[in-house]
Amino acid sequence: MEFNKEMIRFVMLTLGGFVQGLGMSLFLFPHHVPSGGSAGIAVLMNHLTPLSLGFSLWLNNFTMLFMAFKWFGFAWTIRTMYAVTVTSMTVYWCSLFISIPHVHIALDLLLGGILFGIGVGILIKYDASSGGMVVPALLISTSRSFRPGQTMFWINISIFLMTALVIDLKIVIYAIVCQWLSTKIIDFTNRSSPSV
């Protein structure tokens, strides 16, 4: 029975990481719009160095996750590392093999924000996270009884501002709109407890 629960959990973590990666790679990253703080740092690294977006995202997330061992334990951290790897591989493969026409940035922000929010919501619901800035956001939200999506929104604003200053000022507006939408979806998806 316990084995079946863990299998279901990892299927859902795979789904969450994949959906999150699709939103980022297909709709947000083509416009240099970061979906969150760690993605913002990955966009900056990709802009300033020859590192790919997928690898930059993985590196940033794994660096932050070393903090998670102390507060969230081994099992949570391993699940999150698995989800981060699924997301990073999705970003990497989509950037290599999938190219879609971008009709309008507003549509891309809407679709990217929705997919990102659904993906992260699934990960949190099944006792993991998307890594990166979610780690400090969950620390603050659990200690202060704030909603995880709200907390993540405010942490990411400073990174969006830095990304906007280096790449383009309008990015901060796009990123805030995307973050607002995705955090609403994260909180909505995360309202009920998982079935496993």
Image: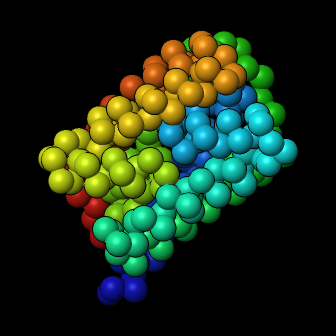
Q: Is residue 171 above or below residue 62?
A: above
- Colour mapping: rainbow
Which residue shows up at 46% across the image and 30% down it?
158
Task: Identify which residue is drawn at 21% across, 54% down.
Answer: 142
Percent position of residue 182, x then y: 42, 33
Quarter of the image where one finds residue 103? top right
Does 52 appear above or below 194?
above
Quadrant containing the N terminus is bottom left
Residue at 64% x, 58% y is: 59
Q: Is residue 133 above or below residue 151?
A: below
Q: Residue 183's x, y, as percent?
A: 37, 34
Where does residue 38 sit, x and y in percent of width and height?
Answer: 54, 45
* Depth check, front residue: 125 or 196: 125
Residue at 64% across, 50% down: 57
Is residue 90 visible from the viewing direction of this image? no
Q: Is residue 91 above or below residue 36?
A: below
Would residue 54 be visible to someone looking at this image?
Answer: yes
User: To which quarter of the image does residue 94 belong?
Assistant: top right
The image position of residue 115, as x and y in percent, is 51, 38
Quarter in which the C terminus is drawn: bottom left
Q: Nearer the viewer, residue 142 or 187?
A: 142
